[in-house]
Image (cartoon, rainbow, N blue to C red):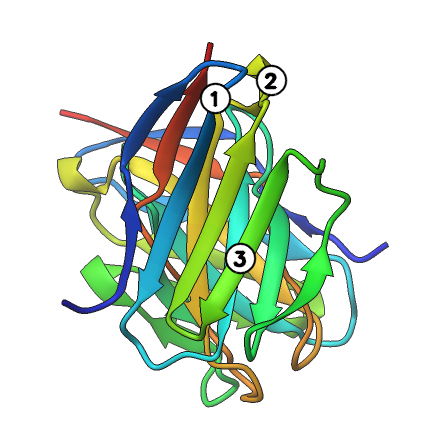
Amino acid sequence: AQSVTQLGSHVSVSEGALVLLRCNYSSSVPPYLFWYVQYPNQGLQLLLKYTSAATLVKGINGFEAEFKKSETSFHLTKPSAHMSDAAEYFCAVRWNQGGKLIFGQGTELSVKP
Amino acid sequence: ETGVTQTPRHLVMGMTNKKSLKCEQHLGHNAMYWYKQSAKKPLELMFVYSLEERVENNSVPSRFSPECPNSSHLFLHLHTLQPEDSALYLCASSRTGTAFETQYFGPGTRLLVL
């Protein structure tokens, strides 16, 4: 079955350090890819989406993600973490136009001062 | 008001109560969704409405009853719920028929069933 996997349910970084949140999908056919962020007691907010225009996608709040077809990955990065980045991050995949949006299990990011 | 709004934001109900959750989207979208988010579990898609017709019902118990009177409004009617139904219920909307269709979410309703 097609699936999306986020490696690590919890990631902790120091303020100012690099943030790397991993997302891998199971199909060799590139799907439609998204990253969402959920702050405490809030809904999901779209961070960025892969549109095939470029493999490196820039999103809001300084986040970016790189699509790597050979690795079936779409990892999320930010060069320098800020305390306000503490939240849960979800990778989501749609396999075809009109298909369901499938979410990973989420990665909780903690930022230490 | 823009985006997707949900009311109430918090709800406590007994197992014999009847209540409704409301969602409204101001984005001109034609599809709306209900998701359930429980602690330590992946997001679960419950219902999908496209052009006001229900197109998906993911084996959701009948104590949850959705209603979509028009493309901007979505309701989730609740009756005789169980404590395990306590969760965050998220509404989302999108414009279907586009290659990079994107779902936009509301803030959620935090439901506690006693």
Badge 3 is on which residue? B67
Report the disc number at residue B17: 1
Of the pair B106 and B78, the residue shown nearer to us = B78
Provide residue B31's location: percent of width, then percent of height.
Answer: 51, 73
Which of the pair B98/A50 is nearer the observer?
Answer: B98
Residue A44: image x %, image y %?
Answer: 37, 50
Q: Secondary structure at mark 2?
A: loop
Which label sits on residue B82? 2
Callout in the foreground (2, 3): 3
Marks 2 and 3, how far apart at CA:
21 Å
Q: Nearer the viewer, mark 1 or mark 2?
A: 1
Look at label 1 and name its amino acid.
Asn
Callout 1: SS: loop
Type of amino acid under label 2: Gln
| Neighbour tally class for label 1: few under 14, some 14-19, many 20 plus, Cα within 10 Å | few
- Residue B39: give x, y in percent of width and height: 50, 24
Mark 3 nearby-residue class (10 Å; few <14, some 14–19, many ≥20):
some
Label 1 to label 2: alpha-carbon separation: 11 Å
Image location (x, y in percent) of residue A26: 76, 58
Mark 1 or 3, nearer chain start: 1
Chain of the residue under label 2: B
On the image, which quarter does residue A35 sit in? Answer: bottom left
Discs 1 and 3 share one subunit: yes
